Amino acid sequence: MKNSNFKKLMMLFKKDLMNLKFESLILLGLIVVGYSLIIFRVQATDDMMKAAIIGNLSFLLFLGTLLIIFIRSFSLVSSEWKNNTLYMIMPLPVKGKSIFLSKILAITTQTVVISGVSLAFLTIVWTSIIGLSEVQEMLNAFMINSSEFFSEYKGEITKVIITGFFSFISLIVTVFFSSVVGRMFKKMSGFITFITFLLTNYVIAKITSITYKFSGIESSIQNGTSVEASIEIFSTQQFWFYNILTIIVTLGLFFATTYLYDKKVEL
């Protein structure tokens, strides 16, 4: 049974990746066009200035790409009702848990691939504009300085990566939950989805804030605490508290989403 469920999950995952293929190709095309414009537009004579301009423009391009992926994730749920592709490729009905888990895996895979391609193009653009030898010198200087930084602050960097990952998954699950709630209504489905998304995030923020107060954990930013000797984005206690709370809320939203989806399909 477990093997069968895994095979179904992989089939759904491949289907969702294929559904994202056209969009991914468009995003890759935008990245190529964007970096091509950067190559022809950067006119600064100083290498450091060139590197700064390329870095800033690349960051804006990357944020725009993530925004497109985020907006597109809203339509992944509605497509199941529009196309009915799920029941055409699967011999048996599939529960909502497998459906949404495959979509989370597909969006995460797409984001990782697009991020990797953006980083590769950024390296190519830097090399073509600044020059390979200059880039190597910058990288060597960066590695010398960053090795000490990473060794000293690797704990904080790990916290940021883990927190960012769970926050990303929570955001995607919130999108799916809002989309399913919106599909429960025949009229103004898109508007209801948008309002549900905003309200859900507001409620999550309130739950986090209230729980923080009752737990006695206070943010160092709210207390005005400054850290001179070392950088501490949030304490270990805050890190565990926030991520455990995020996981609990995300799981609650995930199971609520699958329950509503299954009920909608049954109707």
Image (spheres, rainbow, N blue to C red):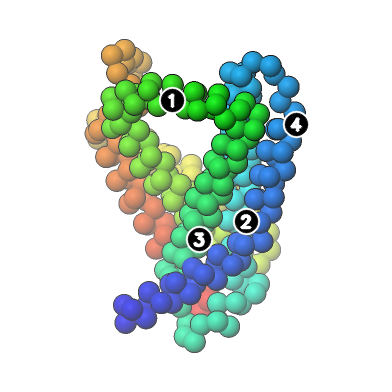
Measure the C-alpha gap from mark 4 to mark 2.
Answer: 25 Å
Binning the other alpha carbons within 10 Å of mark 4 as few (below 14), some (14 to 19) or many (20 upward) gives: few
Which of disc 4 and disc 1 is earlier in sequence?
4
Binning the other alpha carbons within 10 Å of mark 2 as few (below 14), some (14 to 19) or many (20 upward) gives: some
Q: Nearer the viewer, residue 66 or 153?
A: 153
Measure the C-alpha gap from mark 2 to mark 3.
Answer: 11 Å
- Give the image location of residue 195, x and y in percent: 59, 49
- Give the image location of residue 36, x and y in percent: 72, 38
The amino acid type of the residue labelled 3 equals Ala
Which of disc 3 and disc 2 is earlier in sequence?
2
Q: Secondary structure at mark 3?
A: helix
Q: Residue at x 74, y 35 (%)?
A: 37
- Give the image location of residue 1, x and y in percent: 32, 82
Instruction: Note whether residue 64 is visible.
Output: yes
Q: Residue at x 55, y 82 (%)?
A: 89
Please give the residue where the numbered disc 2 appears in the rendered image: 24
Which disc, if any, is residue 168? none
Please give the residue where the numbered disc 4 appears in the rendered image: 40
| 199 relative to 213, above or below | below
Measure the C-alpha gap from mark 1 to mark 4.
Answer: 27 Å
Which disc, if any, is residue 106? 3
Measure the C-alpha gap from mark 3 to mark 1.
Answer: 36 Å
The amino acid type of the residue labelled 2 equals Ser
For marks 4 and 2, give the one nearer the viewer.
4
